[in-house]
Each structure stands twice: as C-alpha cells, then as structure tokens.
Amino acid sequence: MNYAHSENNYEYLSKIKSPKDLEKVDNLEELCAEIRHKILSVVSKNGGHLASNLGVTELTVALHKIFSEPEDKIIWDVSHQCYAHKMLTGRFDKMDTIRKENGISGFTNRKESEYDAFTEGHSSTSISAALGLAYSKQIKKEPGYVVAVIGDGALSGGLAYEGINNAGQLKRNFILVINDNKMSISKNVGAVARCLNAARIRPSYMKAKNALEKILNKTSFGKKIKDVMKKSKSAVKRVIYKDNMLSNMGFAYYGPVDGHNLDELQKAFTTAKFLNKPVVVHVMTEKGKGYKFAEKKPKDYHCTSAFDIATGERISKSNSKTFSQEFGQAICDLGRKNPKICAITAAMTEGTCLQEFRSNFKNRFFDVGIAEEHAVTFAGGLSAGGMLPVFAVYSTFLQRAYDQILHDAALQGLRIVLAVDRAGFVGEDGETHQGIFDVPFLSTIPGVKIFSPSYIEELAPMLKKCTENEGISAIRYPKGAEGYKPDWFKYTGNDFDFYGNKNADVLIITYGRIFSNVIAANERMESIDKSACILKMNVIKPLKKELVSEVMKFNKVIFFEESAKSGSVSEKFGDMLIESGFNGKYQSVTAEDGFMCHASIKSQLKKSHLDTENIVRKLMFI
C-alpha cells in the first residue's frame, strides 16, 4: 500500500453519504484501499484501534453492500472495529474528530447514528443484543435482517454462548458472522480457538467429498455405496472435522470464507439471507491487513497512540513509568518470594503488563480469554485449593464480574487479590470504558479491603499488603504515569495520613490520582495564607470510626474523589459524619452520576472540577 495518500483524493469514499451509495461504486477494491488510507491517516494522528479496523475493511463493505441498513441491523461486537462502518454510514466527513472531545465515538453509539443499532464497548454482547432485535422484528412483523459480527476472541466470553444457545431455537433468519483472525488482543487461548481451527479444514473435506461423489455416480454400484455413505454422513463429519458445535446448536454453517475477497463475501452473505434459520458465516481475516507494521505486530497496533505512518514509530513516547508497569514488576517480585502467587488475565497480558510474569512463572500464569466472570470464579477455585490468585483487570471490565466477586469469593471468605487497572477516567475510549464505578460496586461487598495508591512508590508495598490480607483485597490505580509529587513525600504504610496544619479550619479529603492535584492546589493556597489540612486515604474501604472522629475536629470538610457520586467513598463518609453528629460544613466533588464521554483525561478531570485549577477555586470559596 502507498501510505502517502492525499487527504483530498478520496474519489469514492467522499461521495458515500449512506450505504445505498455503494450501488454507484464501480470499483469496490479501490474503495477499500481508500478506507484503509483514511483509517491510517486518522489513527496515526488521533490514536485508536488500528489493526482490527484494517482487518475488517472488505468485510464491512460487503455487509453494507448486501444488507440494507437501517432496516437491516448490523451489531458489531465490542465495536472497536467500526471505523469503516462509520465512513459508509454518513460520517466520513467527521472521521478526523473520532475519539476527540465533541467528536464521534470510537465505538458504535445509538445516540450518534441510526446506523448504530446498539451501543457497544465490551466483548461478547453482540449475539444477545442481535437476537433481541431479531425477536422484536418478529413480534412487530417488521421486515429486515439482523446480523451479529463477532470476533473469534470474543467467543471466549460466556455471554456469547448464552446468546448462541437461545439463537439456535429461532425459527427465522439470523446471521452470525464470525470474524476469525486468530486473535483478540492477546493471542487467543482455549478450546474455542481449537474448535475454529478444526472448522477451517472443512473446505478440503468438501472438495474431497465432491470428487468422491463424482466417481461413485458413474456406476450403479457406486451409487449404492454413496447411499450408504449418506446414512453415515454425520459420523464421517465427526471423524473428519470433529463436529461443529454451532451446527449442533441449530445453526447452518457456511465457511470458512476469505474475508478479503469481496466476491466470496458477497456470495456468502447473499446465500445466508435465503436461509430461514440461524446461520453462521465463518470469515477469515488478517488483523492489520494492508499496513505492514500492523500485520507483523497486530498486538502492538490493537489500540495505539499517534504514530508515524512511514516508520510505525509512536510520535510521543513517555519515559515516565506507568502504574501498570510498576504492577508488572511488583507481582514478579512477589511471585519469586511466594510460590503460591498466581496471575490471571482476561486476554489483556500486555495491557496489564503481565508479560514478565508469564515468562518467569508459566505454570502460575493464566490467560482465561475474554471471560472476566470465569476469571474471578477460577481465582476462587485456586484460592480454595490453597493458592493466592491475583487477577489483573481493567476497572471497566471488572464490573462484569460483580456476582462472582460477591458470591464465589466474598461469601466464602476466599483470599484473592484484584489488581484494578485504569481506575478513574481513561480518556478517549469514552463512556463504555471509564473506571469510575469500581469503588461504588466494590464498596457494597462485605469484607473487601480497597487500597488506592497516589504514586508509583506506593503500589508495590500496597500490593504486598493485599497478598497478606485475608479475604478479598483490591488495589486500584490509574491509567498512565503519576502526577505532581512534592519532594518531601514518602509513603508511610499507614491506612491514612494527615498533611499540613491539623489546626486549620478546612480539611481536604482525597485519595488516588487526585491527591496530586490537591497537593498542587494547596501549595498555591499557602502563598495567600489560605492553606488547608489534607487527609490522604490509602485504604478507602473499610472506613474506620477513629478516622471519622479525627475529621469531626474540623469546621469545614471538602472531599475530592474520582468516582461516580452514588456509592462513592465521599457519600459514605458524609453519612458517617452525620451519624456522628457533625455540625460543620461538608461538601463532596466527584464525577457526576452518568456516563463520561470521550475526551482527554485532562479534560475529563476539568469537567468534573477535579483538576488543580478548579480545586483552587473551590478552596477559595469554601
């Protein structure tokens, strides 16, 4: 591919205002080339999901050519691969704003377009959502097809099979497209990947079967042999390609199909439309197709920051150590000293920085695929067997396993550690990925102890405490590097610490990343003799009564917290103050209840009045 493409030279793409305009395109291959160029152009500047979007270009064009949205519904699982879909549904002229504040989302979003049939962001949900849409059409006697597009990696999630189990009973057309690129984010693992590998040999089986039938049809004796073979067809299939689970669950099976061959794709989808039952179209694609760097290292270009197209090099490389990197090093150090420690990831080895642990402790490392619910219950089983499991997971994905944390771990008093990465605001991934709900939901679970480091140096000792604690311990830390840290700061190992003048009229309470902004703000207030005392919480659950007693001594208390308001620590702290008879003034500043749209983390903090400037303003008028 010629990566140097003129921004103004999109002959076909610039004319497409809706999928209907595909009828006017006489060269779909060139359209696909233009789409890839635009994806590269946009992601190289804005960052975003690259390899997955490049891999589904032909697939997306073929779907929109054969199906008629918005009457037909296409549901994209996770939907991080929806960039081409957005260009073909009237949003080409907005692509330069993708993932930017006030721009279009990097995922499908019902509020954004009638062509986005379902808001997505998490894995394995497409089949259930599409099935609901199919049944709604059936009940209302509405025309139109429903298509779910799911990756082979997402098929490691249990929700996908709950949907498949129901969908197989449907007595009408329902199309499930499996986008098989042998990857999710980290390399696919488990029986599902093996099942798809077995299905891939079907074309050779079919060719051999057809050739044999031609020979047998030439004689009457041969025809008798063929009749006998037909009666044993199912047994032969099981021997040849070990059965097809989806076929056994009520789906017709079509494939594998070359996911980069437009003619094959269009024929497959046209055929699928005429089946009056659920059908699987198994499509083979290459993640990163058309961009050599992404083809060679698709994991590195799954979700990327801005980069130079010609070299593939990231434009802004930070030398600052991240919390995730510190966690990866800390768990290795603990793993060397404690042979019971196991590490678990849900298809996010690189994202959670567990590569070194995987290399050093292979028999104690487990990638369970995109299956957070299973990960927690599996951790419970490891714990019940005498091991010490540490599950590293993004905050937004941990919320999928609430029942398992409550029922399969906490209820039994099992000892597990939750390493909650990307806690708080996460930036451009937007409302489906913000980590502002883990504090409210973990706080409802009896016996959970939650640590919240503000700085890199605190993470390792806090993680060690987690491994020494009974029951469930969680350590939550933000995306990226630490913020402002004064020279005098040193971690004490206490559950909480007071900084500054304890005789001050005003007390600021905070924890985690926001402590940096509070310290910076208070230093500004010192210059005008309006400084406050600061309470830094290192453990945010449980809340100790003696801590509340200390806070009762202040006349004005303000709590800054990077969490949803409902169920927040500040909400619970306020209730405890009232119950204790506090007569002073109490305020809390949190993220508003609701969903925070995509923008930079800096902007999200500012909108929530949790940046240094807004904290100064609050302190000026408290």
Image (spheres, rainbow, N blue to C red):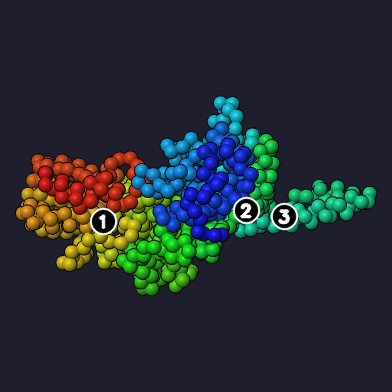
Q: Nearer the viewer, residue 613 or 455?
A: 613
**Residue found 23% across the figure and 43% down from its top:** 571
Q: What secondary structure is found at the residue carrying circle 2?
A: loop
Mark 1: secondary structure: loop
Q: Residue at x 69, y 44 (%)?
A: 267
Q: Within 10 Å of the Cα at label 1, are there few (<14), some (14-19), or many (20+) other Cα atoms?
A: many
Q: For label 3, count other residues whose C-alpha is less than 10 Å away and answer few (under 14), some (14-19) or many (20+).
A: few
- Picture residue at 67% right of the left edge, 35% below the top: 276
Quarter of the image for the N terminus: give it. Answer: bottom right
Between tags 1 and 2, which lies in front? 2
Q: Which mark is residue 513?
A: 1
Q: Which residue is mark 2?
A: 260
Disc 3 versus disc 1: distance between alpha carbons?
54 Å
**Near-viewer residue (52 or 262):** 262
- Which quadrant would residue 104 be assigned to in this image? top left
In the rendered structure, find residue 203 and report the number of the disc placed on it: 3
Where does the C terminus fall, quadrant-wise? top left
